[in-house]
Image (cartoon, rainbow, N blue to C red):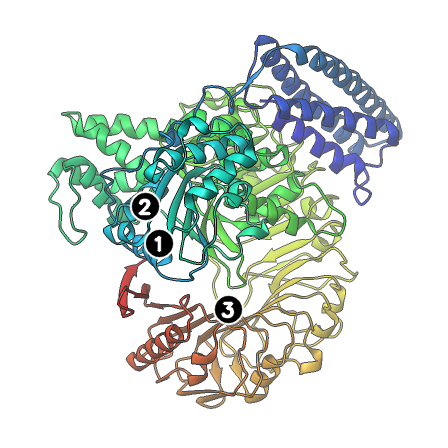
Amino acid sequence: MACVALTSLMATIKLQFLQPNNPSRVPLDDEGMESLYEKLSSLQAFVQEKSGARGGTAIRDLEMKIRDFALDTEDCIEIQLSNFLLAKNGEDQQKAAQKLHQTLREAAENAAELLEKSKETDDEKVVNESEGALMIPWLKHASASEPSNVVMVGRLRDHVLIMNKLIWGSEKLEVVSIVGMAGIGKTTLISSVYQDPDVESHFDVRRWVSMPVAGGYNNVSQLLYTLLWTVLAEAEDNEIEKGSIPDDDDLAAEQVYKCLKGKRYLIVLDNLWNNRAWYDISGCFPDDNNGSRIVITTMHFRRDSSHYNDGYVHNMTLLNPKESWNLFSWALFGDNPFPEHQKIRAPPEFLEIRSQVVETCEGLPYSIVVVSKRLSMCDNIRKEWKKVQKEIELLGVLDRRALIHTYNQLPQHLKVCFLYFGVFPKRSAIKVKLLLRLWIVEGFINPLEGKELESQAYEYLQEFIDRTLILIDNWSSSGKVKNCRMHSALHSFCVREAQKEGIFCALNTLQLPRGSFSMFANSCRWLSFYTHKFDYYVLLRTNNPRSIFFFQEDAEIYVSFKLLRVLAFVSSSFLQRVPTRLHDLVFLRYLSVTEWFEGLDYIVSTNQNLQTLVVSSKESQLGTPTIHLPSTIWESPQLQHLELDKSYVIDPPSMDKDNMQTLSWVCPTHCRTGVYCRFPNIKNLEVFVFGSNHPIILDNLECLEGLERLTISVLFNHVLTLPKPSLFPSKLKKLRLNGINLSERDLTVIGMLPQLEVLKLVNATFDGKVWEVEKGGFCQLKFLLLENKMLEQWMVGDGSFPRLKHLVLRFCCCLEKLPVVMEDIHTLESIELEQCCPSIITSARCIIESQRDAGNNILEIKINGENIFLIRDKLSRLHTLRVRL
């Protein structure tokens, strides 16, 4: 319970004292600060070692003391540092510096004392939850028992894909990994395939091995002997006596090898904690080039391992609303599976709560079945449903011991990032760009030499995705995760753990009695206002919030803003009510407001630490900007990300802004020369062009040597001239053009960009009605979006688009067919068509069939939101499977 508090304290010390580019201006002993940081690191190592341990009261009491020490010390340090930075004269500054020195000395002494106490607890007997008799409930199976009478509702596409991977494909030994969060139906899916008569007749030997969790995924011996016992228990002709099981790992592996040698086998390794466990025992499995298969089900797929590049990874998805209701109805009304096309007539009292059940369970099969079984045993459906719904909202349905086990397996630097997901409302999509920036400004990302913080933060996110703790909502065109979310079953656990740590409070002020908020006012590091049906339990402390999130409009709060680092989604009406409390935000690093108001420029320009400023407008309209923002915004020295919507215009800076990485603004047409040279290190640029009756020429872009993403939006048919090839940024990877009339020269220029990977032509028009791509054009392009209502013909020269993966056509109602050359682009993975003429659909089908014949089984078509999958059956015929997303 102390790990997050320690992480927060250590992040504060790094941000304020140990980073060379952000000096606190307080004269400190560097060796003393490093010594304090080392002591905190040692305490953190102790806490990590004891995570998940069931020890005596001494260990639990010590962890609580460490937590309270970390939270109190962080408060004292930042309060004294704030007093120092806001001191109006030398005498006040000296007093604050002395108190800060005293606070740091006391912190070092207390840390040393706690370290001594931690050494005294080393002799106390500790049982880790991953050892002994404790088993994670949903992973607890008899190791050698095969599934029987398994019913699968839905998952037709998943079933067909896994069947094809097992029966068809290479004769080499192949590994199929089924990956997904707890309760999503991994075991049910492979059970249904395992029992299929076609699979049963295809393999000489089938073995089902449920790996125990009790020994932990690092216990290779236990995995090996579980496998051996399962194989021997069903060995034909008693090839090896069970009593001869050796106590040597190598001999045990040899026995498994002998049992399977020369046979076409299917081995299911169910519930592997980590896919690396497969590599540890992979030597047991002979490869006789006879089509043998290994199937792994796991919640944690390590993608940094190079051993699985040749295997197939099947990521399980949540059920859609229709599938969810089918599963609910099946679990409620019968033990026999029903055809998916059969309509189940549920009683009226169940139909009344249908939408609520689907929303609450969020497509997780385990949740759906649990709710269905609960409701099947009661008479008053409405009353019981309200009770069940409240339990799910507060506690979730997944076993808490299992979730604690999962949480304790996280490295220390990931635990605080994981709990931070609780600040977002349940069932909400989270912008990855926003999430990574927040992690950085909070100090959660440990900087590594030679690696950018954004890249490192994305690796943290990928680790959560690999562990199936976070779900992917959608992908960006560049192949990275654009939006993610946490399933509500995990969100409830996340919120409660963060509150236990004393760092988080989620409040719905609309449900609180008048005046009762004062008791919550200083109870957390992160304060989030969002509407939810049931208030969470809050541990009361006397801490100042560091981050406040306004997901609920017009929240009335009375808290100290003095130590704020993050103020997100705050309305201007709220800020105007409390202007006096905003002038001293010396630690503020992230600020997003719904609209600008007079006086905000002072807060921004005087802030020495502000890194991100986002200003939106509730009624952002296309047209001439109405608000001219003060250029004093540029005076904030640490500003890296400035995002202004179309309602605002600002004059360019008079000084170079070396820190700027992101800029979204209205193009300053009145002062073209030298504008973009002020941003030498910018990576992302979004430009809105309007307000001029004369042709606009974008120049100075060639000086943006590090620019990777460029978006240009032209409004009201203004004329824009793109740069010449030599004047385009050479490192540009992503280009989005909105509302631009493109000449043949413009299209040729774009096709010559050496590193362009993503091109989006939205509401685009061409000089003619024909687009002819020259030979060898777009050599690095991976994603192409084309939206052109007037285009009639598209011709592509040989060798063009050699790396294209995704093609999206929207509103191309005059275009009759796709270029024939698309049949030869074997990197192609998807074709998406929206509001296109029928002949293009026919053309796309021809392309996918041609690609299938050439061996490309990845390519899929999506037509008006409906996925079309062409799947081979056992007779090598192509069948169409439609899945509406």
Question: Would residue 745 appear left or right of 357 to someone viewing this image?
Answer: right
Whole-percent x, y for residue 381 in the image: 17, 29
Whole-percent x, y for residue 434 in the image: 56, 49
Q: From this view, report whether residue 287 is shown above or below residue 687.
A: above
Whole-percent x, y for residue 569 in the image: 53, 44
- The mark that comes first in sequence, 3 or 1, is 1
Note whether residue 644 is visible. Answer: yes
* Amino acid beneath label 3: Gly
Give the structural element (helix, strand or loop) at label 3. loop
Separation (CA) of disc 3 from disc 2: 53 Å
* Amino acid beneath label 1: Ile
- The mark that comes first in sequence, 3 or 2, is 2
Q: Residue at x 79, y 25 (%)?
A: 36
CB contact under 8 Å: marks 1 and 2: yes
Relative depth, front residue between 882 and 789: 882
Q: From this view, report whether residue 332 is shown above or below residue 674.
A: above
Whole-percent x, y for residue 134 in the image: 45, 21
Q: From this view, report whether residue 374 is shown above or below residue 599.
A: above
- The mark that comes first in sequence, 1 or 2, is 1
Look at mark 3 in the image and give the residue it sits on. Answer: 623
Give the structural element (helix, strand or loop) at label 2. helix
Look at mark 1 in the image and give the residue it sits on. Answer: 162
Look at mark 2 in the image and give the residue it sits on. Answer: 189
Separation (CA) of disc 1 from disc 2: 9 Å
Packing grade of label 2 (10 A; few <14, some 14-19, many >=20) is many
Label placed on residue 224: none
* Amino acid beneath label 2: Leu
Give the structural element (helix, strand or loop) at label 1. helix
Relative depth, front residue between 739 and 340: 340
